[in-house]
Amino acid sequence: MFKGLLTTLKEWTGKPVTIQYPEEKRPVRTRFKGRHVLKRYENGLEKCIGCSLCAAACPADAIFVEAAENTDDERYSPGERYARVYEINMLRCIFCGFCEDACPTEAIVLGDNYELSFTDRHQSIYTKEMLLEPVPEGGKPTPQQTPPGVYVRAVPAMKDPED
C-alpha cells in the first residue's frame, strides 16, 4: 500500500502529459509523413515541372497532373513545362511517399501537417493552390516574366541525397 501511495505522489508532482490540442500541437518525428506540400525555389518559381512521375508512381492513383508550356512572359517553373493542374485525392492517398521518391526536382514533399479533415468528398481533393507553399521572402509570385534563355534546364543540378 505504501509503494502504491509513493507512486501516486510521484506522478502527482510530475509534469502533466495532457496536451491542449488545438492550441498546443504535438511535435512530430523527423520522418513523419503528413500532408503533401509543393515546394518553390528561393526566387519564387515552382519546383514542379509537370512531368507526372509522381502520378505514375502512386499505387493508389490519387494524383492528377496536367502540364502546360512555360513561356518567358509567363513562367511558373524552370524548363519547358509546369503543372497547370495538380490535384491529390486525399481519400485515396496512403501516404507511402512513392510520389516523393519519384519526383526529379524534389517538388512534392510529405510535410508535417497532420490536420486533415473534411466534411465533403469534394473537399478531399487538394488543389495546387492548397498544396503550394507560400512565396519565400525575397521571391516573386508566379507567373514571372523572365529574360529569354535564362532557364534552359527543367531539372537543376542537385546535390546527392543525405538520407
Image: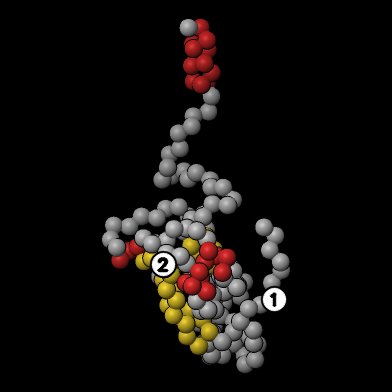
- In the displayed structure, 48 sits above or below 2; it is below
Three-letter amino acid code at disc 2?
Ala
Q: Is 155 left, or right, of 3 in this rendering? A: right
Find residue 129 and report its horizontal and vertical position in percent. Answer: 43, 71
Find residue 149 and report its horizontal and vertical position in percent. Answer: 65, 91
The quarter of the displayed image where residue 116 is located: bottom left
Q: Residue furthest top?
A: 2
Work out whether residue 128 can be spotted: no
Q: Nearer the viewer, residue 120 or 74?
A: 120
Q: Residue furthest front?
A: 59
**Helix, strand or loop under label 1:** loop
Three-letter amino acid code at disc 1?
Ala
Q: Nearer the viewer, residue 7 or 58?
A: 58
Work out whether residue 78 can be spotted: yes
* Residue at 63% across, 78% down: 155
Find residue 46 and report its horizontal and vertical position in percent. Answer: 55, 75
- In the displayed structure, 112 sits above or below 19; it is below
Q: Which residue is mark 2?
A: 62
Q: Residue furthest bottom?
A: 148
* Residue at 44% across, 58% down: 94
